[in-house]
Image (cartoon, grey):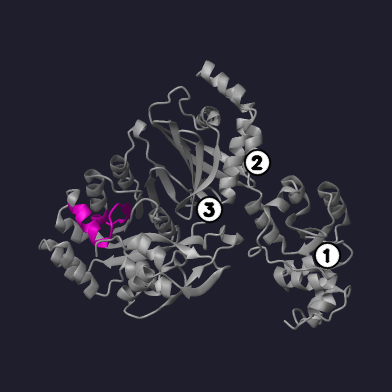
Amino acid sequence: MRNLSYVGRRRPVGELLIEAELITRDQLQYALELQGGNGTKLGDILVKEGLVSPQDLASVLSLQLNIPFVELKRYLIQPEALKLVPETLARKYTVLPLTIEEDGLLMVMADPENLQAIEDLQARTRMRIKPALSTLSEIKEALDQNYRAVAEIEKQLSHIPGIEELIEAEPRVSPAAVAEAPIVRALDLLITQAIRDRASDIHIEPQEDRLRIRNRIDGILHDSMSLPLSVHPPLISRIKILANMNIADRRRPQDGQFSFQAGKNTVDIRVASSDTVHGEMMVLRLLDKSFAVLDLARLGFMPESYQLFLKMLRAPHGMLLVSGPTGSGKTTTLYAAINQMDKQENKVITIEDPVEYRFADITQIPINPRAGVTFANGLRAILRLDPDVILVGEIRDSETAQIAIQAALTGHLVLSSIHANDSIGVLFRLLDLGVEPFLITSALVGIVSQRMVRHICPNCRTLGKRPVDEVLAYKEEMGEERTEFHSGTGCNYCAQTGYRGRTGVFEILVMSEAIRRKLLTNESADGLYAQALKENMATMRRDGMLKVKEGITTPYEVIRNVFSLAH
């Protein structure tokens, strides 16, 4: 794009875009024809048709209107400025106050030519509004990140003592009585904020002097807010009513589930409670029904590992296991695996505890201990339903392991997860569950062991020096000297963490003839591991450091998640 600093103030935006070599005159004419007399802005049409990016359009508009263009992901917003404009007003006009300056309030706007908005904002803030420009998507994202629900929650909670007294006086309080209380609004705001923050879990933890709320984001817990202890009883009671839990029983662990409408998306929320010395603790697991299962190619597999995994999934029968601790992404990998299978020619049946996400053309069966449906007897029933591919949520006991092995030996492809530290550990876990070595070698096709590491934020990624322990860990694994690595400096886009999102780190063990022979002769874990390395198995350490080399994650993340393994 050429320098446009010389451009006059109010030249038509189409002419400026042509001069900047962002569109051609033919494209401008096409957009003008689409515009007709319908009142739609020319810039909006150009963006909708994919002829110009929102960023380029905003840059040109800033020159046309002679106002600054602000990159919100990097801009440090003043809390004092934010307090001047209520969230409802900011969302009404799609604006965000940035900083208080001597001659007014710098305000980023999606439409800086909206005079009505400027007049309303000036009347509200009693300050002169100085418009700035950014893209619509960046402003909306910044609104979600900066207008947190804490103040509104505190306002709602100030009215709660009445409902607390009601709960103390009547343990079996009616849902209608609680639904009328401010706690309803407060809980909605708490969940909405967690969804905006991309949290997977909300932890409600009573302490000696406060109620601590924490959100798990990208696998790491972050303090969200601290609330007065008086909020604790009505908040817990409200959640219990929603999740069909026993509101009067505060001693025994309970679990339940309810749905929450977040805009256009429905989020399923799984609830678990347990008594502590300071009262009941709760954890809410957020499961977005609009969740789009990732393609296998987007889970983080390196090219060779990806092809290896695809080859194992094409096996006509046998067992494929995915291992790792809780929260390592096993379920996501299994879902992605079955989702890419041919569901027209194959009958795919899953048995899960619980069914987290639902898929078209796949039969999913939930575990129901009260009805006597366990992994073991549910799997027996599935074998009579003529399946081609079976997904067992988890192999937890000897009976399930034995039946899954038999299913794999009788012409079915069985996918499942199992808890083990690494791929070799899975073999010994199966032995511990009482599966004979000859059955393992006959049925098992391969093992995927995995962990999750955080992505470096793409917006604030820089190259710089890292601590000595990270440099040494990289050198030990990769065998090369390197002193500078990519990392995130922290910005609004990643909530100043330097990370945004996660990717997988994988280790794939193929059951070769040599490994089968060694397992049958009671070879040690070290011997099996050495054989796997001889056959060029890429370990999780190696896979993690390859992602460091490509600038995907940091050495710290690989060390934190993978280097605790024995090998």
Query: How far apart are the two marked residues, 3 and 1, measured between alpha carbons?
Result: 33 Å
Position of 214 relative to 460 (above/below): above
Task: State the SS at label 3.
Answer: loop
Residue at the spot x=63%, y=36% of the render?
A: 154
**Residue occupying the point 73% across, 55% down:** 96
Mark closer to the observer (3, 2)? 2
Residue 395 placed where, x, y %? 29, 48
Q: Residue furthest front?
A: 102
Quadrant in the picture for residue 420: bottom left
Label 2 to label 1, Cα distance in Å? 37 Å
Vertical relation: 201 (above or below) 496: above
Q: Which residues are magenta?
A: 408-431
User: Regarding mark 1 in the picture, which secondary structure is present there?
Assistant: loop
Does the magenta segment cover residue 490? no
Q: Quadrant of residue 511?
A: bottom left
Between 283 and 25, the one nearer to me in the picture: 283
Task: Please give the residue where the numbered disc 1 appears in the rendered image.
Answer: 41
The residue that label 2 is drawn on is 151
In contact (CB < 8 Å): disc 2 and disc 1: no
Amino acid type shown at disc 3: Phe
For the C terminus, the quadrant is bottom left
Instruction: Describe residue 48's horizontal placement relative to residue 360 as left or right.
Output: right
